[in-house]
Amino acid sequence: MMVRNCFLILMFLLPMTMSQVVAQTKLAYPDLVDRLYDFEALSKVPKTGERTMNFSSYDRSSVYDSLTDTYLRWDANSDGNGFIRKEGDEMVIFEADGPGVIWRIWSALAKEGHVKIYMDGEQKPSVDKPFRELFEKFEDEYPPLNFPNLVMTLSRGRNFYIPMPFQKHCKITMSGDWGNYYHVIYSKLPNGTIPDKSFDGTYSNEGKIALANADRILENRGFQRKIYPDEHEDRIDIEIGPGEKREISKILGPWAINRLELTFQDKDRTSDIFGDLWFDFSWDDKHMSAVHSPIGMFFGMGRDLANYRGMPIGVMGNTLYSDWYMPFHEKGSMAIVNTGEKPYKITLKVVRHQLGAQEDDFLYFNAKWHGDDSSEKDKPIDDSLTQNQGREIDWPMIAVKGTGRFCGVTLHIANFWEEPKEEPSSWWYGIGGEKTIDWWWGEGDEKFFVDGEKFPSTFGTGSEDYIGYAWSAEPPFPTFQSPFASQPATPITGKGHTVVNRFHIADNVPFNLSFEAYIERYKGRIWGKQNENICEYDVVAYYYLK
């Protein structure tokens, strides 16, 4: 990524007798927009001061009691209107010191009450408009807002991914009948890095062009990608029998894999291939089984073929693609395992480019699967990291020690129930509180604990809200896709297999000591009055690790 402007600030530190020169990097707005699709940046070691956090309307009755080291009312679910404090008739929903960048604003219901954004301690807000217009109008142009891959509605959920930088401080308030539910994700920039200006409600022509270019790049995801000048391509035909593990490639480094494409035969389109075949990748004989996942889950679609295009991974016909950036120093070992009872033939294309000496310090790519039916060898969760004092509702998606970046998940929910005898008032099972069966698996808040913190710096408002949709998507339970969040698969009735994914690219979560991500689970593995129903979870977490 090109840095468009640098300058020096002289700082005089006493009792030192010599002046110390500290370099400070200024980021122009297009630099920040570039981060929306910069996969290589995910492999960079976090810098001092770098953090990513979330402000949301979660139920404030959920608290951590430090005296007893317990979590109280941790399953509280009145998540629609939580806030920090009131200032007159304005409800403060976000407040943070800079320098920083807001990456995502989401709401389940944006109405006519005003959102106000105050930058750098100014008394006059940079933005003062109906909350609904944030998702519909660009500056003062007429709606609809014309960046469909940056601002999108996903099954009722409103999503805004246009970066808003601030230098010193940012405060966001709501007033009037603004709606229900909100998330604001932001990053604190590393020490010595600052935006060249704070967002003032307008965009320079250079900024507008950068957004238009980003929207086009995000639209062409899967079809187009970053091309490196020194790329090398391997095309590997693989035949693998039942129960076999086969090494498919051993690449001597230093290289970085920047594209994978897996294709399969038409006869396997409806077979068990996506659950039977597993990737098992290791880097430098240090990160063993860093990628360990069924191929269907790795590519974000679950265990049945589902066409969708996410930014880092997706499925187009018979081709499953990945643009995750996978660097290694000395050796990249790639194996595939057939856990099923049938032989398969696939072709794997591996695109890689040579790393230079200046790219010596990086993080390794990981993609780890685990689920309710995991064997011990398939559990990458370190049980010693989990905290159970009143946190029984938290289902672990990832728990790791070390330095790295969290970059997202693919979550699969298998939810089956006995058909109710009662006739519904509408649709298949009715709507809201009038349903003939309480089948909904979601409502679970996401909670991210960074570097051993006791209270999570990300605390969400519901499983569907974390992904980016809203109101449990009922009815009629659509599939949807976007660069950063998709629901590739769900039955039209909601009964069966649902797959969702959420990718954190610009809003990745850096950590230095440890990282834990949980999703609340309101449905037990066995549920119903006579334990006649089943709801099982499994997940692939994508992250980078030192």
Image (cartoon, helix red, strand yellow):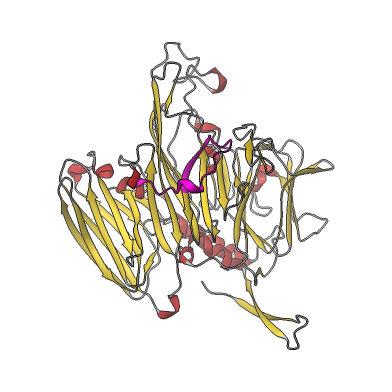
**In the rendered view, would you say 189 is above or below 473?**
below
Q: Is residue 15 magenta?
A: no
**In the rendered view, would you say 23 is above or below 284?**
below
Q: Is residue 417 visible?
A: no
**Extreme residue toward the top, this view:** 422
Query: Which span of residues is magenta-colored?
Result: 378-398
- Give left or right: position of 21 versus 149: right
Number of callouts in the render? 0
What residue is rendered at 48% in x and 16% in y?
436
Q: Is residue 112 visible?
A: yes
- Give left or right: position of 255 versus 6: left
Residue 194 lies in quadrant: bottom right
**In the rendered view, would you say 153 is above or below 52?**
above
What residue is rendered at 70% in x and 84% in y?
20
Q: Is residue 385 magenta?
A: yes
What residue is rendered at 56% in x and 37% in y?
391
Q: Nearer the viewer, residue 472 or 343?
A: 343
Residue 107, position in %: x, y? 61, 41
**In the rendered view, would you say 298 is above or below 190?**
above
Q: Nearer the viewer, residue 208 or 297?
A: 297
- Give left or right: position of 332 versus 188: left
**Extreme residue toward the front, this view:** 68
Quadrant occupied by the C terminus: bottom left
Residue 35, position in %: x, y? 53, 63
**Extreme residue toward the right, this view:** 88
Residue 168, position in %: x, y? 73, 63
Residue 369, position in %: x, y? 37, 47
